[in-house]
Amino acid sequence: MKLRTISATFALAAALGLGLSAPARAQAPDPCTVFLCMASVSGFGTPSPQCAAPIAVFHNIQVWSPAFNPPATAAARRTYLTTCPGAVEPNQAIVEAIIAQWGYTP
C-alpha cells in the first residue's frame, strides 16, 4: 500500500474510534418544547413530568452585567421563546404572560 493510503486509513480509524468512545451528551430541548412547558406552568395547560429539563433551560438563560440584569434577562428569554415558529403569531400573548411571570427572575 502507498504511504498516503495507509495514513488516510489510520486517520479514519482514529476518528471513528474517538467518535465511538466519546461520552453521549444530552440534547438541549428545542425552543418549542421550552415554550410548551413554560406555558403549562404559567397556567396554559397541565405541566408534564418531562418538563423539568426544558424549564431548567429557560431559567438558565440569564444576563449578568456584572450583577443580575432582570430586563436584559427577560429580553433574552423572550427572544429564545420566539425562535419557536408557533410562539410568534398566534401565541404572542402566552409568550408575554410567561415573561411577565418568569422572565425577570434569576
Image: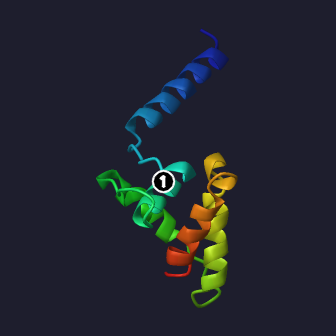
What is the quadrant of the N terminus in the image?
top right
- x%, y% of residue 36? 48, 53
Left of 64 or right of it: where is 105?
Answer: left
Above or below, 52 relative to 64:
above
Element at label 1: helix
- Rendered image quadrant of residue 47: bottom left
Q: Residue furthest top?
A: 1
Q: Residues within 10 Å of mark 1 (few under 14, many from 20)?
A: many
- Residue on which the image places disc 1: 36
Query: Residue 5 or 16: which is nearer the viewer?
Result: 16
x and y, in percent, of residue 4 in the image:
66, 19
Decide which of 74, 46 is in the foreground and name it: 46
Which residue is at a point 58% across and 18% down the rendered structure image? 6
Q: Residue furthest right?
A: 89
Q: Quadrant of residue 66?
A: bottom right
Q: Residue at 62% x, 55% y: name it.
A: 91
Q: Residue furthest left?
A: 49
- Determine which quarter of the picture holds residue 78: bottom right
User: Looking at the image, which residue is at 61% across and 69% down?
Assistant: 96
Image vertical order of residue 70 relative to residue 10, above or below: below
Residue 54: x percent and y percent? 44, 57
Q: How many marks?
A: 1
Task: Please tell me which residue lies in front, 70 or 23.
Answer: 70
Amino acid type of disc 1? Leu
Residue 85 image offset from top left, x and y in percent: 66, 47
In the rendered view, tell whether residue 74 sits above or below residue 16. below
Q: How is the image coloured?
A: rainbow
